[in-house]
Structure formats: structure tokens, C-alpha cells
Amino acid sequence: MTNRQILQAMSGLMAGMFVAILAGTVVANALPTIIADLGASQSSYTWVVTAELLAMTATVPLWGKLSDLFNKKLLLQLSLGMFVVGSLLAGFSHGVELLIFSRVVQGIGAGGLTALAQVVMAAIIPPRRLGKYAGIFGAVFAIGTVAGPLVGGVLVDTSWLGWRWCFFIGVPFALLAIALLQRTLRLPVVVRREAKIDFLGAFLIVAGVCALLIWVTLAGNEFDWASWQTAALTGAGVLLLVAAVFVEARTAEPVIPLGIFRNRTVTLTTVASLLVGVAMFGGTVFLSQYFQVSLGKSPTVAGLMSLPMILGLLVSSTVAGQLISKSGVWKRYLVAGAVIMTVGLGLLSTIDADTSFTLLSVYMAVLGIGVGMLMQNLVLAAQNDVPASELGAATSVLSFFRSMGGTIGTSVLGAILANRVASEMTKGLDAAGIPSGGDGGGESSVPDMSTLPEPVRQIVEHAYGVATADLFLIATPCALLALLTVVFIKEKPLKTTSGMERLAEEAGAATVTDKTAVGS
């Protein structure tokens, strides 16, 4: 395919990815307002984020496997349709329960977009040329991540629109993506009559992952870490996943082919993706809350304050992609990205309520540069080292573990944030002689800063500043472990044929082998 044909085919993919990114980022600066408006708690704040991540995480392997069996374009359009349904439900929500449910529906759709967009890219673009186009996707990612918080902030600050439009605004983009995919994406339909969906394996994986993630989210807030609820959820999760491994090892069409983990590159990139998810998503998802609560900024200004991190990500992913396509060398960028990401998280662990925006900008830019060099190129390394028939499974496994890391990070760090904020607020209020009404533990509702008297406001700002810095401090060792993992990945030359070309070659080789066997 020529560059023009590839760009035309990718237009619908880019629109779809933009929608998926917008779904997460447009509500980032609106969440404090949404949670305050619905009268919900810090735990609900975490759940609104976690629900989408959890649904996306649990369904990514299934979407990836389906892409190896059925029409990829139709699956992409189906995932976009689910996103539209979830967005409409979220926009019409009048309670936090329906909002969380709608985020689950959005997450299922986003899981399809996350897995399938990268699978389709690998199918039509050779790994040697993929870095350049991955840079374009990095640009779309950056634009969506920049535009989302800004648009969300403006919508929240505009009285005649409000936070509900943060969900409605993604609907036309999703519909446009469906139309573009129908018109521009041309993939050969490979009908596999013997294909069977492993429903039992899919159910066991989804149920096991959900049980563990729900435990991680609720433990420390709804019940103690050492409690019968913990034993029940962890026990059920482990048993379900053990059963899933047993089923996957024996079924003809497993959702996650266990054999791909014999590939050293896939195993190491999977571990690194999990750790990147914990460090990146777990650390940064609460930045918007820090900007608004601790620094006292409006939702619109909070969106602007995230620009340095996104610009760093945009520049590093684009430049690294171009250099990889030109030279065919990729490992050095993985190692450098992991080092820079670790440094960025370490720097952000020093922030507080008095940190200047200049320092914050430098710290966020460093983090963005590291993530931009690392995250997408982990997928490239794995896709380059697996048979074309397993591209969907390998890509979805990496997306699955990165999303699971993000969900675990968001849940665990959200619980830590809630408890640390409550502890710091109680300590500050007691020191100021103001009745705290708490025992220094548990959680409290997210405060509306505009209604607080000045002494209390300063105590709340300090509490959120200290607690947010702690999150980055906890995320830093995860980034360091990701660096150690990346070091052991073996660099292999990037292939010069696309996934579809490799699939045809593998099919031809299999046919020759069959004929030889029959002849002998």
C-alpha cells in the first residue's frame, strides 16, 4: 500500500482512537464538578475512572481474539456503537450509579478500539514502516488528550452547557468514525469456518479479573484489607483465573493463547506494559484534581496546565517513531523512555500546594517524553516478533495488561489518596482547633472549594498536595521495575512485510507443508 492509501485507511482508525481518548480525557477536569454535583464521595470519583478502565481491561483480550477470527472492520464499528450507547447513558445520568454503569459500557467499546486499532495497523503496515505511522497516532493521542481537558473545562464552566455535554460531545465523532471506516478501510475478509469462540475461557478471564480489581478498588474503603470480603474476592478471583488457564491450555481457539508467552519478547513487553500502566495511569489520573483542589484552578485552567506533559509525549513519540522507521533500531528508545519516565515520576513526587507552575511544567514534560518513547514502542517490539496469525492476540495481551496496570494503579492509589487526604485534613483541622468530625481514616466527600472558609481551604489544599505527591512516590518504583524489564528485551530487526503479507506467506507455507505430507 502507498502512503496515501495507508493514510486513507487509517482515517477511520484515527477518528475512532480520538473518540476513545476523548472519552477518558474530556471528563478529567469535569470530574470534581460532576462528583460534587451528584453529592458523591472520593471513592465514587475513583470508581467513575476505574469502571471504564476495568471494563476495557477485561474485554480487550476477547476483542483481540475476535479480530483473529472475524471481520476486523465490523468489530471496530461495533465497538464504536457501544461507545455511543455508553456516552448517551452517561450524559443523561442523574445518579452516580447510572454514571458508573454507563462508563462500563463505554469501557467495553473502548476496549475494542484499543485492541483493534493497533491490530489493523499491524495488518496493513510493515513493522519497519510502523514507527512513522505510530507517530501519527501519537499525534492523535496528544491532540485528543490536550483537547479533551480543555473542552471539558470549557463545557463545565459554561452555564448553559454543563458537564453532561462532556459525554454527548463524543457521539458525533464516533458516528463519523463509523462512516469513515465503512468508506476507507478495505481489508480482505478471511472466513474461518472452523473458528469457535471460547466463551467459557472469556467468561472465566473476565470474571477473575473483575473480582480482583473490585477487591483492589474497595479494600481499605468499604472494608478492611484483612477481612472476609478480601478473602472471598481474592479467593474467587484466583480460582477463576486458575480455571481460565486450565481451559485456555486445552481449547482449540483460546482467548489468550498461552503459547505466546513462550516468546521472550512478548513476555517481557507484557510485564513492562503492566508496570507502565500502574505508573502512568495510576500516577497521572489524579493530577487534574490536584490542579483544581490543591492549586485552586478552574477546570479550564487545569486543562491548560496539562499541556507540557502532552506536548512532551507528542514530540517524543513522533520523533522516536520517525527515527525507528529510518534506522530499524528500537531498543535504545525503550530504555531511554523508561529512564526518563522514572525520573519524571520521581520529580513529581516532590510537589506540594506551593509548587510553581514552571517546575510542574518541567516535571510533567519529562514524564511525557518518557512515556511517549516507551508505551507505543513496546507494542511494536511484540508485534514484530510473533506470527501474523497471532497479531491480534499478542496486541490485545499487551493492551490488556497495560489497562489492568492502569486499573490497579488507579484503584490502589485512589484508596491511598482518600485515606491520606482524610488523615492530613484531620491533622490540620485539629492543629487549627477546628472540629474535624473524623478519626483520621476512611474517606470524605470531595470538597467544593468555593464554599470553604479560608483557614479550612488552606488545610484542604495542603492535604491534597501532600497526598498527590505520595502517589507519584509510590508509582516511581513501578517505573524503575519497567526499566529493568526493558533492559532484558532482545532487539530483533524489524520486518519489512505487513501482517496481511505475512499471513499470506504463512498460509502458503502451511499449504506446501500439507501437500508434502500428503505426498510422502
Image (cartoon, grey):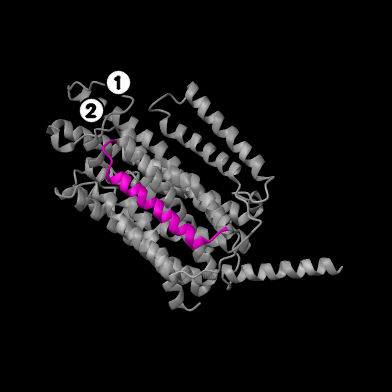
Query: With 376 as the anchor, is 171 left or right in this view?
Result: left
Q: 171 above or below 47?
A: below
- Report the disc number at residue 500: none
Viewer-closest of 219 and 440: 219
Q: Crowding near pointer 1: few (<14 within 10 Å), some, many (20+)?
A: few
Visible residue check, residue 501:
yes
Viewer-closest of 309 and 104: 104
Looking at marks 1 and 2 on the same chain, the residue that comes earlier in the sequence is marked by: 2
Q: Position of residue 101 (x, y in %)?
A: 37, 39
Q: Position of residue 495 (x, y in %)?
A: 59, 70
Tell me how many marks there are.
2
- Report the disc number at residue 428: 2
Q: Position of residue 510 (x, y in %)?
A: 72, 66
Viewer-closest of 287 and 472: 287
Q: Position of residue 315 (x, y in %)?
A: 36, 65
SS at circle 1: loop
Q: Which residues are magenta?
A: 70-95
Query: With 493 as the anchor, is 450 left or right in this view?
Result: left
- Location of residue 128 by image quarter: bottom right
Visible residue check, residue 306:
no
Mark 1, residue position: 439
Three-letter residue code for mark 2: Gly
Q: 243 above or below 357?
A: above
User: Of helix, strand and loop, which mostly describes the magenta segment?
Assistant: helix
Three-letter residue code for mark 1: Asp
